[in-house]
Image (spheres, grey):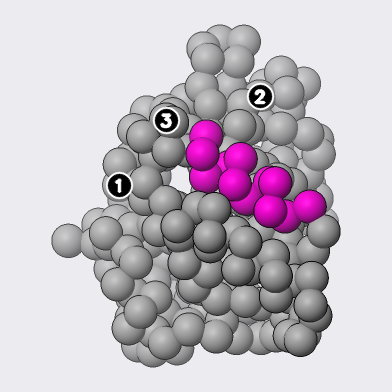
Amino acid sequence: MSKKIFITGTGTDVGKTFVTGLIVKKLKESGLSAAYYKAAMSGNERGADGKLIPGDALWVKNVSGISQSLEEMCPYIYETAVSPHLASRIEGDPVMMEEVKRGFSEACQKYDFVTMEGSGGILCPICFDERELWLEDVIKELGLSSLIVADAGLGTINSVVLTVEYMRAKDLPVKGIIFNHFHPGDQMEEDNLRMCEYRTKLPVIACVEDSSGELDIEVEKLAALYE
């Protein structure tokens, strides 16, 4: 039976895809059967054939070296760079939970470790006009625990604590925090780490530098976070 985890963030552009790629890479290079999944991707470009390319999935595939096909990674791909609910209003093809679950189940049947990445922050609307579907609904429906990716810089204490408290209020389990854009020795960022751990009682499991090509965590500890 496969093991799974969800990667959310404190907001858009904190580096969820970059960090997720390093997570999947760590698992793959350790000989584990690893896969990536995302319910919906917005802001994608078209290839020479006119078809949309799932950019986040392509980046994770390239950096990690996994053999999983792009078609298996994401059921809903949009061109407009807005949240999925608005992208589908503009382009059509609204997200349906049944299709998200089907694709996720197929990935779980084929691979031992499935890492699912969210869209935007925890309060991202996935669908709204045809039905009301939020990112938190997807996490709960799939029964996933989460890791939170946060920017290490100014303002992160507020955004991390608010994200954790919201998720706890919604009964969404959180396993830990990963700081991105981290600068070792930076007094403020080091203090941000300590303050976030203090207020949330969650561990910062890894800190990722901009130039890093690796996730600084033992693969056994990383794999143990999956359920």
Depth order, front residue of 39/182: 182
> Is residue 156 in the magenta section?
yes
Depth order, front residue of 218/127: 218
Residue at image x 28%, y 68%? Answer: 112
Q: Is residue 17 visible?
A: no
Please identify the dominant SS of the magenta region: helix
Secondary structure under tag 1 reads helix
Image: 131 above or below 127? above
Q: Read off the magenta span.
A: 155-166
Q: Quadrant of the C terminus?
A: bottom left
Q: Is residue 137 visible?
A: yes
Whether residue 198 sits left or right of residue 120 in the image: it is left
Spatial CA span between label 1 and label 3: 24 Å
The residue labelled by disc 1 is 105
The percent position of residue 198, horizontal first and vertical second, equals: 53, 60
The percent position of residue 48, horizontal first and vertical second, equals: 82, 56
> Is residue 189 in the magenta section?
no
Q: Residue furthest top?
A: 130
- The number of callouts visible is 3
Secondary structure under tag 3 reads loop
Residue type at numbered disc 1: Ser
